[in-house]
Amino acid sequence: MAVQPRSRRETWRLLFLISPSLFWLIIFFLIPLLLVFAISFGQRGIYGGVRWDLTLRNYVRFFDPLYLRIFYRTVIIALMTTILCLIIGYPQAYFIATRRPRWRNAFLLLLMIPFWTNFLIRTYAWLLLLRDQGFINTFWTSGLHGFLLRLAEMIPLPIWDALLRATSTPLPLFGTDGAIIAGLVYDWLPEMILPCYAAIERLDYSLVEAAQDLYANRFKTFTRVILPLTMPGIVAGSVLVFIPSLGAYVVPDLLGGAKSIMIGNVIYSQFMAVRDYPFGSAISFVIMVVMLVGSLIYFRMGSEGSR
Amino acid sequence: MSEYAVELKRVSKHFGPVVAVDGISLYVRDGEFFSLLGPSGCGKTTTLRLIAGFELPTAGEVFIGGKLQGEIPPYQRPVNTVFQNYALFPHMTVYKNVAFGLEMRKVAREEIRQRVLEVLEMVRLPGVENRKPSQLSGGQQQRVALARALVNRPKVLLLDEPLGALDLKLRKAMQLELKALQQRVGITFIYVTHDQEEALTMSDRIAVMNHGRVLQVGTPEDIYERPTDRFVADFIGETNFLEGQVMGSRTGEAVVVVDGILTLHVPLERNVGMGEKVTVAIRPEKISLHADPPDPRAVLGVVKELVYTGTDSRYIVQLTDNVLITVRQQNVGIGDSGRFALGAPVYLHWQPQSARLLTA
Ligand SMILES: Nc1ncnc2c1ncn2[C@@H]1O[C@H](COP(=O)(O)OP(=O)(O)O)[C@@H](O)[C@H]1O
Ligand SMILES: [Mg+2]
């Protein structure tokens, strides 16, 4: 449909209507963004300030293998988080969306309740679970170990040695990429479930019946009809999980320990510890462009699949 | 091999406290155009879904081609459905939609192509293979839904008000086309509709349903001319119901007194007791009006109302203080010739077998 030429008055009316959000975006988004963009071409001052310049040094520095490796790890962690959220979230969304209407809201509420707790506290809870003296390892090294020890006294078997040796030391849970992924999945799961739920709930169930009527078994019905028609939800959910995972820094800071860091931590330390604002800005910008381009391609793919 | 394409034996379906289908038995013959006719909510769709396997009966048995279906899932039953809202896959082209069933049954690619193009030709929809359903008109979508089911050459085709969403003119044309198509392909059709005219036009046999039960099964003529039930007579076409009491019966005939003074002679198909309360049903178009009594059994009345409807004139004639009857006369002549004026006395006459005796 062609856009109708608008009268001048209508243009002003529309401008008036969007002015609050326009104002907000300009003050709190566009100006800071431009500021960061400008700073990214500057240089670190001797005492941590910004020396304005027009150099590409900061961008070149990002391609140092040290940072590239962290960036690569970050992408992998974000991808794993997204995939795990999808594997856990889609079936859950499907389950909720296929309940009776009055149950659906109850389940959605149950889903949201943990997220009324502060984000930091939730992440800290994972720390208590995963660290060497945490709940899991306490169980592993004393509870299970002691139990096996007593069992080994009663029934002699050759495997006890290996099992006892394994349970005598804590599992390496804390400070790994796995710990980060666990924390990120936990934090971002609802962002996957909600768009998937919306897509599945909107799915016309008679299409599922039509597929079954046309000899498609449950699996084929899923792959040929349900999955493609709920693809927009999967795409939206994936972007909503992937983007914040890529920029995460609290979760890797708390759960990754000293060994596992993500690009978010690098940016954080550039601003807060090293006080190299220009380099921090440059990394931020590179990541933003990667996210933007990636999301665009992904959305395009998703909308083609479902049309 | 059974002679019936589909048999339902005392099938019931309950949804919690709702009894959607209440112990119905149906025998649909091979190659038949069989309609389920009844008002909205009477259980037609549920009956169809029980045959397709989308619902499992609470009680009773469903047979397709003589084989007990039990809990066989829909995708293993030799039937296909044309859904009420068509349920075309919006993300697939017309070609992919129609090919879906054949692909699921792993038919060879080349054969699929041939059969899809053939069936699109058959429903008179060639050249739209590469369009998406959303790019088609309602009538075209309807044809795609039909093609998608027919291409599988099912033993039985189930159609749930397939023409319901089309406008009147298109619907009339499609009725004839569907009927012709069914005769050509020879597939058993079970056709759900709430439109009595549609059912009469298309069907070999009709089952009239109400409140989850089958009231009468028969040919269109059976159903229209010889309804066995007051609901059937009322639902299909227009009918006068005269309530009275049996005051005597002779061989093959009952004498019914209506409103205490009006005596009617009605053919008997079953035994009635003296004094039994009954209903006499007479269709308006079966009654003729006369100025002089053509027969000693003609009934005298007075014209109370006259409505000109183009092809017909509709009279409301008062027979007794409490009994009015509708009469339809074809307008054979032009102008007022042959019509009776308001307030004029008229004699009503009908063939004996036009009056039906129903239980009250
Ligand atoms: N899934 C269901 N759950 C509860 N009640 C249902 C369900 N399907 C149908 N019914 C009820 O069963 C009755 C028959 O419905 P249906 O077979 O759709 O009638 P029809 O197709 O003749 O209009 C209706 O009262 C309807 O409300
Ligand atoms: Mg229905």
Image (cartoon, rainbow, N blue to C red):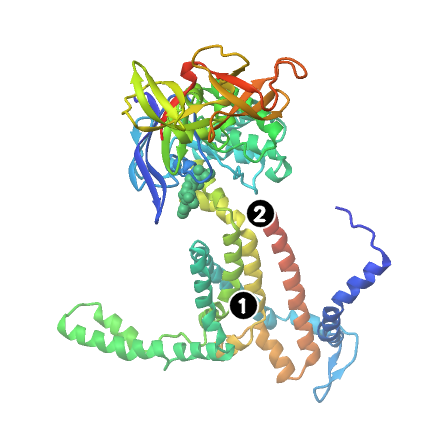
Look at mark 1 in the image and give the residue it sits on.
A73
Q: Residue furthest right?
A: A8
Observer able to see residue A216: no
Q: Is A211 placed above or below A85 here? A: above
Q: Disc 1 on helix, strand or loop? A: helix
At label 2, counting other C-alpha atoms closer than 10 Å, the crowd grade (few under 14, some 14-19, many 20 or more) is some
Mark 2 — on which chain does it sit? A
Of residues B238 and B96, the one drawn nearer to the viewer in this rendering: B238
Discs 2/1, front: 2
Q: Residue at x 60, y 21 (%)?
A: B313
Disc on the earlier residue, 2 or 1: 1
Mark 1 — on which chain does it sit? A
Observer able to see residue B119: yes
Image quadrant in which you'd find residue B41: top left
Residue type of the residue flagged with mark 2: Ser
Residue type of the residue flagged with mark 1: Arg
Query: Any mark on residue A65, and which?
Result: none
Q: Is residue A70 left or right of residue B28?
A: right
x and y percentages locating residue B187 in the rendered image: 44, 23
Query: Any mark on residue A306, and which?
Result: 2
Q: Is residue B1 left or right of residue B328?
A: left
Image quadrant in which you'd find residue B46: top left
Q: Disc 2 on helix, strand or loop? A: helix
